[in-house]
Structures are given as C-alpha cells and as structure tokens.
Image: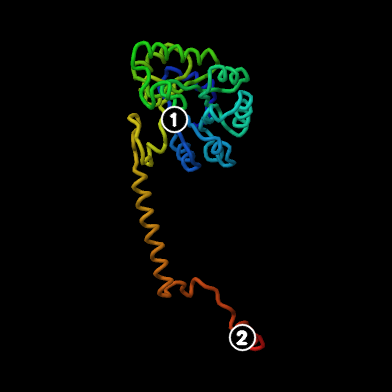
Amino acid sequence: MTRKKPTVLDLRAKKGKGQLTMLRLFTLEEAAAAEEAGIDVVSVPPELVSHPDYRKVAPTLFSMTGVDHRSAGTRDDYLRLAGKMLNAGADAIYCSGSLATVKYLADEHIPVVGHVGLVPSRNTFTGGFRAVGKTADAALAMLEEVRAYEAAGAFAVEIEVVPVEVATEISKRVNILLWSMGSGPGCDVQYLFSEDILGENRGHMPRHAKVYRNFAAEYDRLQRERVAAYGEFIADVASGAYPEDRHIVRMDPAELAAFRMGLITK
C-alpha cells in the first residue's frame, strides 16, 4: 500500500492506539532517510521545510516547524510566519509562547503544537534543564496545563522529561495528542533528535536518548582521511608527481608550432 502523508484528523484518530515515531531533523539527507525508513512525524527548522527540494525527498512526513517564541515577534508576526510555513509545505506549527498566542493561532485554523514539562525556552521557571512534574502538586498542575492547551485549540503537545507515570496518566485523561520526549511509552508519539540516534552529538547526551550508530567516529575517520589526502597532494606538487599528463590539456602539434613561430616576433 502506498503511504500517504497523514492529516491532523488522521493523527487524532490514532489517539490511544499505539505509538508513532518522531524525529528532529536538520538536513535534506536526514529527511530523505526518515522518509525511506517510514518515520511518521518530524520537526524541522523553517529553512528546511521551505527548501524547494524538501517535499521532493519527504512527501509523506507530517512536518512540524516553528521558532522560539522569544524571536517570533507579535501574535500577528507569529500568524504571518505560520501562514508562510504552511504554504511552504509545513503541516503544523510549534508554539512555545503563551496559551493566548496558541489560541490566537488556533482560532485562525493553524494546526498548533504546544510544549509542557522541560521547555528549553522557559527552563528558568522550572529550575533549569531537569525533569518536571516529580511531585504530586507539579504533576496535577501539568495535567491542568495540558487541558488548557487542549481548550486553547492545540491538537498536540510535546511533553518533555516528565515522569513516565505522570505522562501516561495525563495521556489517558485528555484527547489532545501527547508527543513524548523522555516521558515514556504511555503517550502517542516517541520523539528523539536525529543527531542523538546517529551518534553525532558530541556534547551532553540526554538520558532519554538512544544511540543507534556512531557517526561521530565516522566523521573523525573521514577527517583524518581528508588531512591525509591534502598532505599527499602537497607532496605530489612538491615532487612533480602532480599533475600527470592525464591531468592536463595539450595543443595540436601544428597549432603549437604556429604558436611558437608567433612568439618569435613578440
């Protein structure tokens, strides 16, 4: 059966019926790989989703995009950005701004995804980059926050680094989709960064990340090969081994003779 790109309605219909997969991508090559592998949902930067080749390589990936709300401008600016991105090929807009902004976008029929738990742009209010919702009061407050996103019109919310028991119970009690990043399997989508899966991340590795390949080691190997190739080129130039006859163009002998005769008068 030919795969088709899901709509918001399609995703909502899968609520409580298993988990979908989601990646954060940054390149066309990653998008093409996600398409071929069969990933369901992706989060991509605006410059990627608006690339003229993006939908050529990723025709069926449900693609969310957005910007940090601190650089988005006014609500009208946010709305203009959302319209531009949807027209460029995005399927949904991530919004880390206020519930009022989420409602403003949703009222204009923009598919909006909110964010609860560890929200990087708001981490100072939750004590930094740490798990959120570890006390009963905090967990109950998060349930109300998710319900508020649903009431504001968001169709999904990313729930990041929240205790598995909390995320699971919240998911059971709401109709909004929960996209889990480090919040366990009781949600509707499992979300990881491509750079973590591929082992490209050389910095802090989140607890929830799972490394499936070691691209960093391969990049290191390629860098060593790059340096070695450059060194061999330098040595060949110094010794005269490069260029060889096959690397250069020669004149027709008759034209060369005429050229040399012409040089006599110069």
Above or below: residue 260 compared with residue 65: below
Can you tell which quarter of the image residue 131 is in?
top left
Above or below: residue 248 compared with residue 155: below
Is 11 displayed left or right of 139 in the figure?
right
Can you tell which quarter of the image residue 237 is in?
bottom left
**Tags 2 and 1 in contact by the CB under 8 Å rule?**
no
Q: Disc number at residue 58? A: none
Tag 1: residue type? Met
Q: Nearer the viewer, residue 27 or 3?
A: 27
Q: Nearer the viewer, residue 237 or 62?
A: 237
From the top left corner, tell me how far across and down residue 263 is, in percent: 63, 85
From the top left corner, tell me how far across and down residue 126 is, in percent: 40, 21
User: What residue did someone put label 1 on?
Assistant: 22
Q: Secondary structure at mark 2?
A: helix
Q: Secondary structure at mark 1?
A: strand
Tag 2: residue type? Arg
- Of callouts 2 and 1, the N-terminal one: 1
User: What residue did someone put label 2 on?
Assistant: 260
Is 121 displayed left or right of 46 in the figure?
left
